[in-house]
Image (spheres, grey):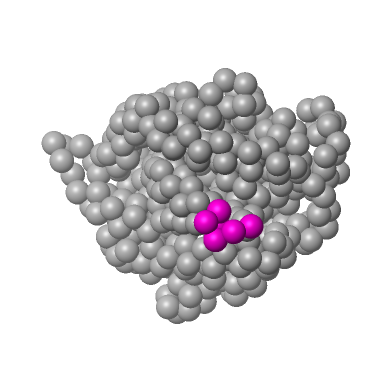
């Protein structure tokens, strides 16, 4: 997964820069990509497990909404500490510990029998995952220069749609099987939790915290990347404390935009399989296969949008436009079209909203100092992730109360539109 090369003064220097950047990208991005796929599979396994759990345990939409959302209470609470630990402790250790913890908790979720047990399992899972995402975003800034960061983040965050592309058909297949008198949805939690435990152990030995510690780079390559990263100064060169960063207008706007963005995306991620299942009446396997379509579109849009953003060095419109496309598609879904093909087309356009994520997450580390960026990434993701509770829960509540998905879809549409507009209001520098 190569990234753009830096401009150098001579052909030999340019070739050296390209070779070094390519080496770093190939070493780190595929592995981080696999880790994030595992992360999203564990986090969203409940979206497909809900189909089986409703049959066996009789859980209502409100229970599933709460189960999906309670994850984010602990997840939000530990975001800033998790991000700061990456800077002050070790990204390698934080990522490894988080993965082993959340993989174990995902496996234990297979033992759930009551709503209270589901809530407790999801709450514990949120605490275990809290430091992973902000840690990786900060970690990427240790290795990739500004001109490459959106593309590097895109290569990492492409795992979000691809986790659904991979996970949806597998989840649908597992749900349709019963082994050793154990329901498929329980096996789903077990089989999706075990890879996180194994990869967490591998991450401890594979990842390197800083370029200066990278034995897999030649000495001159280590010196070059360290020098380039040192030369790069954020747009805002003024030293600011963490408390000042947390009160800044820029960070508040980014946090608000993330909240509305995540409200729409998490609601979609957790409720799309259920909506498709109830509208189409298809088997679990067919729902799993069709569930890959919006996320394939999201993957393609994410790569194209991030690449164009790096080329033009523009972030804000590239973050807003995918949200506007998603809002327009949600407007069409509110009418509850009878055609499954039309609904799937509109759902696919909603998935394009995911293309806003890589360009958005390139912004904090570009405009803030290193220490402020660590705190800011944690705060922005914490505020945004609060929507991970609010979105799925309110969607489930409205559906249980009204018997229609239209009200939840309307709320998602307003959120996507608000997120895009707030992005355009965000300053270009801190």
Left or right of 79, for residue 184: left
Q: Check the picture and name the quadrant holding the C terminus.
A: top right
Q: Nearer the viewer, residue 287 or 75?
A: 75
Q: Main secondary structure of the magenta part?
A: helix
Magenta region includes residue 401: no
Up/down of 172 relative to 81, above or below: below
For the point 42% across and 31% down, the residue is 215
Q: Quadrant of residue 340?
A: bottom left
Magenta region includes residue 11: yes
For the point 59% across and 72% down, the residue is 329
Up/down of 243 relative to 152, above or below: above
For the point 46% across and 52% down, the residue is 19
Up/down of 91 relative to 48, above or below: above
Report if residue 144 is visible in the image. yes
Left or right of 185, for residue 396: right
Q: Check the picture and name the quadrant holding the N terminus.
A: bottom left
Numbered range of the magenta stretch: 9-14
Report if residue 69 is visible in the image. no
What percent of the width, then of the height, locates residue 413?
66, 63
What percent of the width, then of the height, locates residue 29?
45, 47
What percent of the width, then of the height, locates residue 406?
60, 64
Furthest residue toward left: 180
Up/down of 374 relative to 232, above or below: above
Furthest residue toward top: 89
What percent of the width, then of the height, locates residue 319?
67, 60
């Amino acid at each position: 997964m190569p990234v753009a090369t830096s401009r150098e003064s001579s052909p030999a220097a340019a070739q050296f820069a390209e070779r070094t950047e390519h080496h770093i990208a190939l070493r780190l991005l595929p592995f981080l990509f696999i880790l994030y796929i595992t992360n999203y599979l564990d986090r969203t396994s409940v979206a497909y497990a809900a189909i089986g759990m409703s049959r066996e345990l009789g859980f209502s939409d409100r229970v599933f909404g709460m189960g999906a959302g309670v994850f984010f209470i602990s997840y939000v609470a530990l975001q800033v500490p998790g991000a700061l630990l990456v800077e002050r402790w070790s990204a390698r250790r934080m990522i490894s510990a988080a993965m082993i913890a959340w993989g174990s908790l995902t496996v234990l979720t297979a033992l759930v029998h009551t709503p209270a047990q589901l809530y407790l399992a999801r709450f514990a899972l949120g605490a275990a995952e809290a430091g992973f995402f902000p840690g990786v975003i900060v970690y990427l800034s240790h290795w990739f220069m500004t001109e490459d960061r959106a593309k590097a983040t895109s290569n990492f965050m492409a795992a979000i749609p691809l986790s659904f592309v991979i996970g949806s058909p597998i989840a649908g297949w597992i749900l349709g099987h019963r082994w050793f008198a154990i329901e498929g949805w329980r096996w789903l939690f077990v089989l999706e939790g075990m890879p996180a435990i194994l990869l967490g152990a591998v991450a401890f030995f594979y990842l390197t915290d800083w370029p200066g510690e990278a034995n897999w780079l030649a000495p001159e390559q280590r010196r070059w990347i360290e020098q380039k990263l040192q030369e790069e100064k954020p747009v805002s060169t003024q030293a600011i404390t963490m408390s000042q960063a947390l009160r800044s207008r820029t960070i508040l706007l980014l946090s608000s935009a993330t909240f509305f963005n995540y409200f729409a995306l998490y609601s979609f991620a957790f409720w799309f399989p259920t909506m498709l299942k109830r509208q189409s009446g298809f088997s679990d396997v067919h729902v799993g296969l069709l569930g890959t379509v919006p996320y394939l579109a999201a993957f393609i849009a994410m790569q194209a949008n991030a690449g164009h953003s790096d080329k033009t060095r523009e972030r804000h419109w590239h973050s807003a436009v995918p949200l506007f496309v998603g809002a327009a598609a949600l407007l069409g879904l509110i009418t509850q079209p009878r055609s499954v093909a039309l609904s799937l087309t509109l759902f696919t356009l909603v998935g394009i909203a995911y293309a806003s994520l890589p360009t958005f997450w390139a912004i904090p580390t570009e405009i803030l100092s290193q220490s402020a960026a660590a705190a800011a990434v944690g705060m922005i993701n914490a505020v945004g992730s609060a929507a991970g509770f609010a979105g799925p829960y309110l969607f489930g509540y409205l559906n249980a109360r009204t018997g229609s998905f239209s009200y939840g879809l309307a709320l998602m549409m307003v959120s996507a539109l608000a997120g895009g507009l707030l992005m355009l209001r965000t300053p270009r520098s801190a």
